[in-house]
Image (cartoon, rainbow, N blue to C red):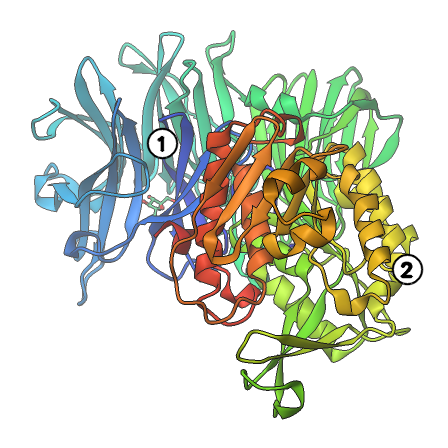
């Protein structure tokens, strides 16, 4: 199951490998997070690029593609870590261009290029030409070839920059640079500390409440039992007018490295780290599923009364916390959730699935350890803690972040529970638990079937020689479209225990659709549909559904958990005949509506499945008023409403709960009608090769765009027409690409293709 262990609240790569967060900033109304990305290689073997996520609210993140790749001699072996400076009208990015020369080099003292490179962008995606600012020859003589990770900021009208470096005699250090806005970067000095590692990576410099801090990631410091427990470390010095305090680690868990800070528009100092680490003994089973690692939640940094930094999850997270309940000893809870514990006893323990946090006043040690294999090689991390007042634990699908004593200490770890429902037990503390729900998943219910595509078109059914199988079914296609764009989707259906059922599961898995709610039965086969098409466009269908597995889906299998994270529920009319699946639809609509989801209905008429057309019409009108969005094609309008004139027909559809009507008009584009007016959008002119699944791709991509525009159900009636027209444009472009290729799901583009 490809969707297993995908996080709900954390940024992770669409696939492939992720490491350091880069270029963190707020620009043009959005938070931007770039990251070290090796697409296609879950263990990071390929050269690093920068991937890009954006968010309006630090909660829901949208992947928007690769923005920087190695393509000049000065960065040919990797676009390494770096930072961003946001100006009024543009952003500037500074990164390390990594070069590994071929030959007999140690790549430390010789044979490695480390160039500081700048690019500009006015939208965060399209980058200017690359400008090399500093090369190895520009760094001070004492530097080895390891100089990297520029962190740049503006201060007193100047650029200031720190770089991490290794000296020729193996000491880690930070180099300081300055530049006027139009001048070259000049070296201003260094910071180093005796016996503190051979290399310092990813430096940062910032202030909190007037106190200055220098953060860095030393490599080569000795590992200890209560400190520096990982292979590499990450932390900070406070700089009191040139006098450095002791080095304080940012995080004491198994998975944390290479953090970066930036300023939010309201002045908060925020930190995001890589929730991963290189070269340690423990593993992540997601590598078998095609990706690895994630970033931490964004954390707010404040100054503690002891002058140390306090870290806490950004307050935005509070807005998605659901009703808290007291934990009485133990409980079961679906991930993601949050546990808050006020600790009052001399012995405290909190366990979440196989992870256990214990504290004992006697020995003054807080320990995070695994009691089973969910840690995948992670054993124990400890800190010395004389008093324990509070614990706040954010548990996502495959990670824990433990904030101790108001954020004075943090422990982050990945863990991989088999199930989303996990046991939580608390001793020695008064604790509450609350679901954290980011409603971002498109759930579709109904038929998933095999379409048999004729190898020959322009002929009668009996003239077709052979048919090729392709996974389809409108609700399944809609999921495919949503997930290919990087969204989360879940399919609810039943398949036969047969090889056709396997093809469907496989196709959906590969598109990133969550298939964990698909049932399998031996009582009926997976539905099949053979189709032929004459030159004048007449299609003949032959369905094998007498009955098929999907029709027999038993409504008792519909559970509230299926809709826990539901943004919208989508369905069609094919599954609304007189069989159990219809009642499953009724149950799904009721629960999803109760949970606040948008209900979306595309009647998608298939007359040949109905003996009685009046019954079809009756059932469509039974469901319409329960929905928020109705999508119809111009060809369906008359059958459903009695009129083919949109001015007459659409108002009858805007009844009950319906807030949006989307009318698709084939190559003439689409219109959207709401109480605040209507908008239309033309479709790009393209040569259609195969329109299979085009309408499903349209509504799937429309819903995806609606969600990424931040529109939830309560916003629908007052949704600005400009947003709706943006969604129509997006869906039209999506469908225009899809019809130029064969098949449904395989023809759908991803976001980066669409943006180009
Ligand atoms: C830290 C680091 C950086 C480098 C980047 C390469 O994890 O080694 O120093 O720029 O990763 O991906």
> CA–CA distance between discs 1 and 2?
65 Å
Residue 124 at x, y = what percent? 32, 37
| Residue picked out by circle 1 | 216
Label ID, residue 67: none
Residue 229 at x, y = what percent? 52, 39
Q: Nearer the viewer, residue 336 or 137?
A: 336
Other-residue count near label 2 (Cα within 10 Å), few / some / many at <14 / 14–19 / ≥20? few
| Residue 352 visible to an observer of this rendering | yes
| Residue 255 visible to an observer of this rendering | no
- In this image, 56 relative to 95: left or right? right
Residue 279 at x, y = what percent? 46, 53
Q: Is the residue 110 above or below the residue 411 in the image? A: below
Which of pointers 1 and 2 lies earlier in the amino acid sequence? 1
Residue sitting at 74 percent across and 72 percent down?
A: 501
- In this image, 81 relative to 659: left or right? left
Residue sitting at 54 percent across and 83 percent down?
A: 458
Label ID, residue 578: 2
Q: Is mark 1 on a helix, strand or loop?
A: strand
Q: Is the residue 366 above or below the residue 652 in the image? A: above
Q: Is the residue 341 above or below the residue 684 in the image? A: above
Other-residue count near label 1 (Cα within 10 Å), few / some / many at <14 / 14–19 / ≥20? many
């Amino acid at each position: 199951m490809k969707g297993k262990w995908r996080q709900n609240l954390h940024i992770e790569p669409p696939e492939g490998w992720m490491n350091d967060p880069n270029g963190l900033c707020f620009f043009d109304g959005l938070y931007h997070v770039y990251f070290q990305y090796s697409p296609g290689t879950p263990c990071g073997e390929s050269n690093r690029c920068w991937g890009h996520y954006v968010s309006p609210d630090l909660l829901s993140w949208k992947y928007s593609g690769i923005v920087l790749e190695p393509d000049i001699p000065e960065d040919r072996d990797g676009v390494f870590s770096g930072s961003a400076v946001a100006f009024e009208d543009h952003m500037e990015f500074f990164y390390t261009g990594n070069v590994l020369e071929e030959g007999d080099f140690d790549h430390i003292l010789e044979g490695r290029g480390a160039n500081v490179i700048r690019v500009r962008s006015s939208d965060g995606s399209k980058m200017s030409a690359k400008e090399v600012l500093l090369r190895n020859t520009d760094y001070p003589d004492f530097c080895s070839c390891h100089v990297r990770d520029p962190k740049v900021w503006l201060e007193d009208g100047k650029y200031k920059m720190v770089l991490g470096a290794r000296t020729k005699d193996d000491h880690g250090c930070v180099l300081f640079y300055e530049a006027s806005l139009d001048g070259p970067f000049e070296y201003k000095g260094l910071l180093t500390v005796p016996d503190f590692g051979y290399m310092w990576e990813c430096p940062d410099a910032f202030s909190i409440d007037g106190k200055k801090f220098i953060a860095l990631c030393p490599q080569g410091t000795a590992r200890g039992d209560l400190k520096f427990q990982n292979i590499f470390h990450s932390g900070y010095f406070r700089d009191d007018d040139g006098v450095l305090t002791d080095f304080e680690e940012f995080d004491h868990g198994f998975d944390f490295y290479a953090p970066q800070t930036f300023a939010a528009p309201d002045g908060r100092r925020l930190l995001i780290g890589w929730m991963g680490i290189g070269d340690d003994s423990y593993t992540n089973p997601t590598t078998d599923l095609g990706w690895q690692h994630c970033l931490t939640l964004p954390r707010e940094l404040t100054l503690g009364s002891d002058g140390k930094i306090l870290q806490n999850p950004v307050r935005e997270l509070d807005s998605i916390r659901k009703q808290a309940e007291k934990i009485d000893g133990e409980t079961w809870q679906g991930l993601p959730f949050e546990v808050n514990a006020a600790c009052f006893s001399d012995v405290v323990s909190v366990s979440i699935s196989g992870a256990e946090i214990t504290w004992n006043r006697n020995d003054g040690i807080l320990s995070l350890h695994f009691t089973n294999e969910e840690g995948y090689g992670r054993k124990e991390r400890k800190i010395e803690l004389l008093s324990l007042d509070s614990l706040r634990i954010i548990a996502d699908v495959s990670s824990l972040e433990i904030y101790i004593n108001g954020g004075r200490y943090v422990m982050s770890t990945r863990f991989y529970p088999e199930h989303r429902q996990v046991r939580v037990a608390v001793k020695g503390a008064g604790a509450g638990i609350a679901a954290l729900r980011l409603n971002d998943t498109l759930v579709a219910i109904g038929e998933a079937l095999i379409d048999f595509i004729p190898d020959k078109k322009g002929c009668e059914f009996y003239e077709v020689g052979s048919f090729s199988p392709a996974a389809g079914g409108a609700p399944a296609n809609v999921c495919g479209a949503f997930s290919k764009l990087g969204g989360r989707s879940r399919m609810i259906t039943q398949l036969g225990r047969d090889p056709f059922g396997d093809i469907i599961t496989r196709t959906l898995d590969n598109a990133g659709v969550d298939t964990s709610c698909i049932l399998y039965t031996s009582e009926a086969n997976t539905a099949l549909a053979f189709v032929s098409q004459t030159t004048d466009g007449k299609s003949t269908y032959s369905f094998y559904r007498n009955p098929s597995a999907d029709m027999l889906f038993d409504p008792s299998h519909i559970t509230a958990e299926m809709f826990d994270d539901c943004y919208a529920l989508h369905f069609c009319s094919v599954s609304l005949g007189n069989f159990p699946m219809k009642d499953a639809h009724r149950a799904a609509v009721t629960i999803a509506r109760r949970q606040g989801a948008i209900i979306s209905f595309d009647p998608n008429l298939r007359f040949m499945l109905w003996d009685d057309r009046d019954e079809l019409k009756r059932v469509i009108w039974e469901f319409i008023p329960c929905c928020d969005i109705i999508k119809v094609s111009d060809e369906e309008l008359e059958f459903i409403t009695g009129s083919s004139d949109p001015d007459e027909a659409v108002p009858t559809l805007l009844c009950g709960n319906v807030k949006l009507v989307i009318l698709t008009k084939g190559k003439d584009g689409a219109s959207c009608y709401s109480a605040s007016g209507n908008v239309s959008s033309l479709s790009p002119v393209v040569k259609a090769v195969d329109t299979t699944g085009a309408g499903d791709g349209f509504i799937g991509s429309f819903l995806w765009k609606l969600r990424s525009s931040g529109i939830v159900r309560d916003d629908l009636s007052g949704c600005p027409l400009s947003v709706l027209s943006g969604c129509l444009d997006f869906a039209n472009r999506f469908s225009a690409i899809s019809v130029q290729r064969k098949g449904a799901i395989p023809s759908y583009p991803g976001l980066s293709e669409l943006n180009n």
